[in-house]
Image (cartoon, rainbow, N blue to C red):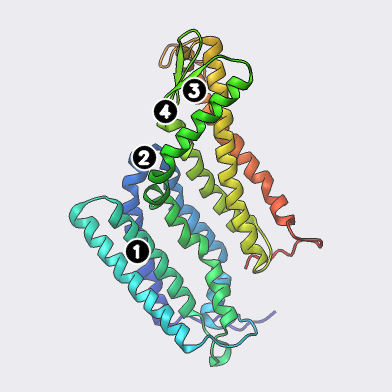
Amino acid sequence: MSTTPARKLDPATLTMGWLIIGMAAITTWDQWAIWSTKDDYGFGYLVPFFSAYVLYERWDTLRAYFTGERTHVSAPTSNWFLKAVTLVGFISFLTFIGGGATRAIFGTGALPTLAIAFGLVGTIFSFTFLSVKGVENAKPTSHARWAALGLVIFPAGVWIISGPFLYLVDNQIKGQLLTNVVEIVTGIMRLSGETIQANGNTIVFANNDGVGIADACSGIRSLSACIFVGAFLGAVFVEGTFPGILIRRIMMIFLSGLAAIVLNIIRNTYLAFYALNHGSSALDKDFWGIEHGGTGISFLGTVHDFAGNASMVLAFIILIACVPLVNRFGRSTPIDKNLS
C-alpha cells in the first residue's frame, strides 16, 4: 500500500472553489422564489442537495485532476483555446455579478435569474477546465481537462433546469402543450365512439357536462420534474466512457421528456372518461364520493390528485427501469463501470 500523501490543492484553486460555493448559495437564494411560488418547480428544493451529492461522489477523481495525480495521454490544450476559456469564465463571472446586483435591487425576474444561473454554470465550467494540473509540473493534457469538465456537467448544468427552465421553456411551450393535450384527448374519445366537442380547453360531452383541461394539466410540471430526475439518473447511474456516455445521458433526458408527455396524455384521457361516466364534479371527490376536505376522505385524495400523483410515480419507475436499457445501448460487451 502506498503511503505517499495526497497533494494539496493550490491556493488559487481553493479560493475559486469557495467562491463558487458562495455563488451557488446566491443562486439558491434567487431560485428559491421560483420553487416556493411555482408548484411545477417544487423539485428545485432538491437541486442543491443532488448537486452536492454528485460532486461529493466524484470529488476524489476531480481532486486528482486538480492536483496532477490523474491524467490522460494526449496533447496539451492550445494557448488560444485556453485564452478563450479564460475569457468565457471572466464574462460568466461578470454576468453573475450583474444578475446578482439586478436581483438585489429590483427583485425576482427572468433577467436576473438567467444571468445568475448561466453565470454560475459558465464560471464552474471554465474554472474546472483551467484548474486541471499536469503530472510532475508538465502541461495538463487536453483529454484530462475535458474529462474533468465532464464530471461537473450535472452539478453545474442542473441549475438551468431548476430556474431558467421556467423562462426558456415553460412559458414558451405550456400553451402549445395544453392545446395538444386537448386535441389528443378529444381525438381518443371520438375514436371510442363518444360524441363530444372541444370548446377552447374544455371538452363538452353529449349531456352538456364537460371537463376543463387546466394549465396545470399541460404536463409542464411532470416534464420539468422528469427531466430533472432523468438528468440525475443519467449523471449517477449511466455508465461508459466518452463519447458513448454523453450519448446515453442525452438519451436518458430525451426518454424522460417523452415519458412525461405520454403519461400526461394518458392521465388526462383517464380523467376525461371518468368525468364522462361519473360527472365532472366527481373529479374533485375521492373514489367513494367524499369531497375534498370532507370527513373520511381517502388517503389517496381526490380522483384528480390521485391520477396526477400516480402518473408521476409511474414516470419515475419507468425512468429507473430505462437505466439498464440505456446502459446497454450500443454495447455488445459487458458494461465498463467508468463514470467519466
The reply, left or right, for residue 321 in relation to residue 259 is right
Q: Distance between the residues labelled 1 and 4?
A: 37 Å
- In this view, 220 is above or below 7: above
The earlier-in-sequence mark between 4 and 2 is 2
Name which residue type carries label 3: His
- In this view, 182 is above or below 34: above
Label 4 SS: loop
The earlier-in-sequence mark between 1 and 2 is 1
Q: Where is residue 7 in the image (x, y as percent from the top left)?
A: 53, 82
Name which residue type carries label 4: Ala
The earlier-in-sequence mark between 2 and 3 is 2
Find residue 214 and name its label: 4
Mark nearest the camera among 4 and 2 is 4
Q: Which of 54 and 213 is in front in this view?
A: 213
Label 1 SS: helix
Q: Which of 184 and 150 is in front in this view?
A: 184
Find residue 71 and name its label: none
The 10 Å Cα crowd at callout 1, few under 14, some 14 to 19, many 20 or more, is many
Q: Mark 2 points at which residue?
A: 38
For the N terminus, which image quadrant? bottom right
Q: Distance between the residues labelled 4 and 2?
A: 15 Å
Task: For residue 182, say whether it is visible.
Answer: yes
Q: Distance between the residues labelled 2 and 3?
A: 19 Å
Residue at coordinates 51% horizontally, 32% vertically from top-left?
A: 181
Q: Position of residue 64 (x, y in %)?
A: 56, 77
Q: Name the residue under label 3.
A: 304
The 10 Å Cα crowd at callout 2, few under 14, some 14 to 19, many 20 or more, is few
Q: Are marks 1 and 2 in contact (CB under 8 Å)?
A: no
Label 3 SS: helix
The earlier-in-sequence mark between 4 and 3 is 4
Q: How far apart are marks 1 and 2 (CA)?
A: 23 Å
